[in-house]
Image (cartoon, helix red, strand yellow):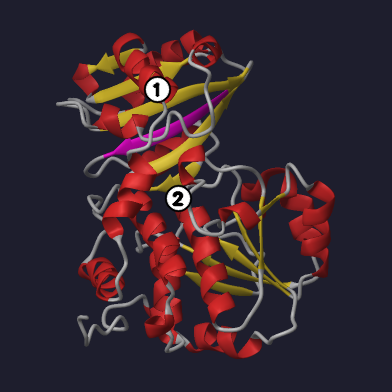
Amino acid sequence: MREGINLLESASPVMVSEMARQCWEDMQPGQSIVIVAHRSPDGDAVGAALGLHHHLKAMGIATNVVLPDRFPAFLDWMPGADGICFYEEETAAAAQLLDAADIIWCLDFNGLDRVGKMEDALRNARGQKWVVDHHQMPDAFADRLLSDPACGSTCELLVDLIAGWGQSDFLSNEAMACLYVGIMTDTGSFRFPSVTAHTHAVLAHFLSRGLGHAAIHQNTFDEQSLNRVQLQGFAMSERLHVFSEYGLAVVAIERGDLDRFHYESGDTEGLVNKVLGLAGVRVAIMAREAEPGLIKLSLRSVGDFSVRDLAAAEFDGGGHKNAAGGIVKGKTIPEFIAFVNTRLSDWIDVS
């Protein structure tokens, strides 16, 4: 076992602040504590919620995890996933947990509108709302805000928080596995610019404590259904639009395509990164027709181009400089492609 890794060196100063330390002192056994994350939860949201749940449980503090809706099936393996209460499926039970909560940990989102149909129940809940997040420009709803947009993932911030509590050596395998998933997925398997020496120090600490990282990667990325593989292959060969002059590409999937390949949540995960990996492409957009008149977008970029700004300006979205999301209402996929074609010269200066 490797010894001597100090996670507080170069950790987020927000996470080791007096307010952060006070969070531990203000949680008491017997309190009703609920952990929530954003709608359409990704690896960082699920990893953060379950990672904090497992750690607090190991330290003698019981919690309930409530998520707005289901996450992609490739995350079903995560320890504790079968104990999550989903608001969309168990609305009354989830609302009761929120209403009775003394403390609600709000993880990986910066505004109450990010929890979808659960927004009113969360907004009206009487418990204190403690936010841990890494997105820019948080709304003013938190009783305690622990935020660092420079960090690559909320899970990394939680590790800093736990280290600030003096408990990093008490992280269980279950907690580390969940937190590792969040860091891994939100950093593009550790290749995004947000990865720092501190990120790798966190990973080194996990490995020194015996975490089997290879199995986590396999469980997350290497157990794909045939339908998912065929859908992504079809999308890349038949639904890809490359605007070479602008270094931008769009893969746009219609509802009929999803039905043809028996789409399940998560089947398009990672597709936008495949588009971004094409030679000459600096900006990638994945458009999926979720229902008639509603297209969901994932945007990625490399370098200085901010897809966060593009998503906010054009697609009612937001996120990070190189990774963002948005929506388009009232357009079909062909109409969306035509819209992109008319707007490219405004988005990207090629002069």
Q: Tag 2: residue type? A: Gly
How crowded is the residue under tag 2: few (<14 C-alpha within 10 Å), some, or many (20+)?
many
Task: Please give left or right for residue 341 compared with residue 303 in the image.
Answer: right
Who's the residue at 43% across and 21% down the image? Answer: 227
Front residue of 59 and 292: 59
- Residue 28, image x, y percentages: 68, 87
* Lower position in the chain sequence, tag 2 or tag 1: 2
User: Is residue 297 shown in magenta?
Assistant: yes
Judging from the image, what secondary structure is the residue with disc 1 in?
A: helix
Instruction: Work out which quarter of the rendered image holds the C terminus and state it.
Output: top left
Front residue of 227 and 12: 227
How crowded is the residue under tag 1: few (<14 C-alpha within 10 Å), some, or many (20+)?
few
Task: Please give left or right for residue 34 compared with residue 221 in the image.
Answer: right
Q: Which residue is mark 1?
A: 226
- Mark yes or no: residue 321 visible: no
User: Is residue 164 shown in magenta?
Assistant: no
Instruction: Work out which quarter of the rendered image holds the N terminus and state it.
Output: bottom left
Label placed on residue 206: none
Q: Tag 1: residue type? A: Leu
- Which span of residues is magenta-colored? 295-301
Q: Nearer the viewer, mark 2 or mark 1?
A: 1
Front residue of 164 and 247: 164
Front residue of 291 and 260: 260
Label placed on residue 43: 2
